[in-house]
Image (cartoon, helix red, strand yellow):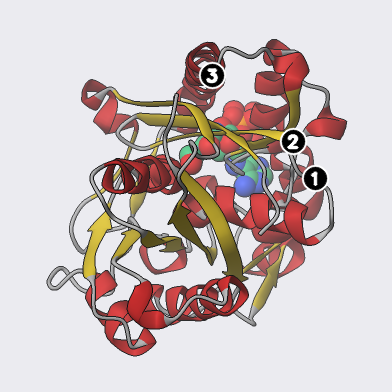
Amino acid sequence: MASGGVIRGWGTALPEKVLTNDDLSAMMDTNDEWITERTGIKRRHIGGTTSSLSIESARKALAMSGLPLESIDGLVLSTTTPDRTVPATSASVQDALGLRCGAFDLNAACSGFVYAYVVAHGLLAIGAKRLLVIGTDTLSRITDWSDRGTAILFADGSGACVVEAVDNGGQLLGWDIDADGSLERLLYADVGGYIHMDGKEVFRRAVRIMVDSAQKSLAKAGVSTDDVALCVPHQANARIIDAACRQLGIPLERTAVVLHETGNTSSASIPLALFDAADRGRLRNGDLVLMVGFGAGMTAASAVIEWRQP
Ligand code: UT7
């Protein structure tokens, strides 16, 4: 499949303020042992706005790409937590970065970054040349800090990349996006309200949803899990990641996990894990990477990409 884009530069951003499991224990009836055992999370970063974190990660991505600002012809910001209802947060980000290009927000919850990356390839297929793709969430703003069922999980962060069109096929080999709106009640936040979640039911479905989506992308790419050098799953819960990777037959040594440091940052989750792996030199030219996420909606998204060094 010739999908025509390659990541040229990337960047991430996390708020300075760190909230540890012990900090949470002082706020509600929970403890480090329970949170670590049930989720894998040890600490998370809280603060900032969706625009400020997006601007920070995007500046790094643009600088790394070395591309002139005027060459960027589109900005897609995946977020569930826009700064305002109107206009889209991408408008503020575009202005602060000094870009003049199409800009829009996309909300597919925790599957959002992969959705945005796939949508960007749709734009490349119809003539766009260089796109900024950002995944940012500030879930701390819609978290009920007295609800131990959600407050232990959610946090803030951002990841961004520049995707550039190339002539001879791109790095995207297979993709899948899906949603089942009938499951809306399992995970939602009303306008101005907090996140409500049926954690057990989301957990139960998450593994199957991730495995199904990953298998569809792998089949479209014509590869198997043995060919995957690195799996980058949504950073929701270490037990969900373990179970999904076990079912897919991908050992944990070939899986990117940062959730012990970040918590669940929704749209930022997959880019934070992917670019952490890239920054640590875990990816080499030609490596196949499987990104796979799930989230409210209930959405799912996955993509198999061939890593190419910028
Ligand atoms: O991006 C997608 C976002 N959502 C998710 O990925 C959520 C998926 N679900 C989960 O990650 C897990 O369901 C949770 C981490 C939310 C909960 O873990 P669990 O293993 O499903 O726990 P549980 O709700 O079955 O609760 C087990 C016990 C209960 O006590 P009893 O009834 O056994 O006495 C809870 O009251 O643990 C208790 N409990 C807690 N204890 C200490 C629930 N939350 C806590 C807590 N600290 N924070």
Q: In which quarter of the image is the N terminus?
A: top left
Question: Would you say 40 lies left or right of 299 here?
Answer: right
**Residue bearing the label numbered 1:** 284
| Crowding near the residue tagged with mark 2, few <14, some 14–19, many ≥20 C-alpha atoms within 10 Å | some
In the rendering, which numbered label is found on residue 262? Answer: none
Say what secondary structure mark 1 lies in. loop
Indicate which quadrant contains ligand 1: top right
In the rendering, which numbered label is found on residue 287? Answer: 2
The amino acid on which the numbered mark 1 sits, given as a three-letter code, is: Arg
Q: In which quarter of the image is the C terminus?
A: bottom right
Residue 276: give x, y in percent of width and height: 73, 58
Most extreme residue toward the left, as rendered? 86
Q: Residue, x 29% and y 55% (percent of image)?
A: 128
| Crowding near the residue tagged with mark 3, few <14, some 14–19, many ≥20 C-alpha atoms within 10 Å | some
Question: Would you say 74 lies left or right of 53 here?
Answer: left
- Label 3 and label 1: CA atoms lie apart by 19 Å
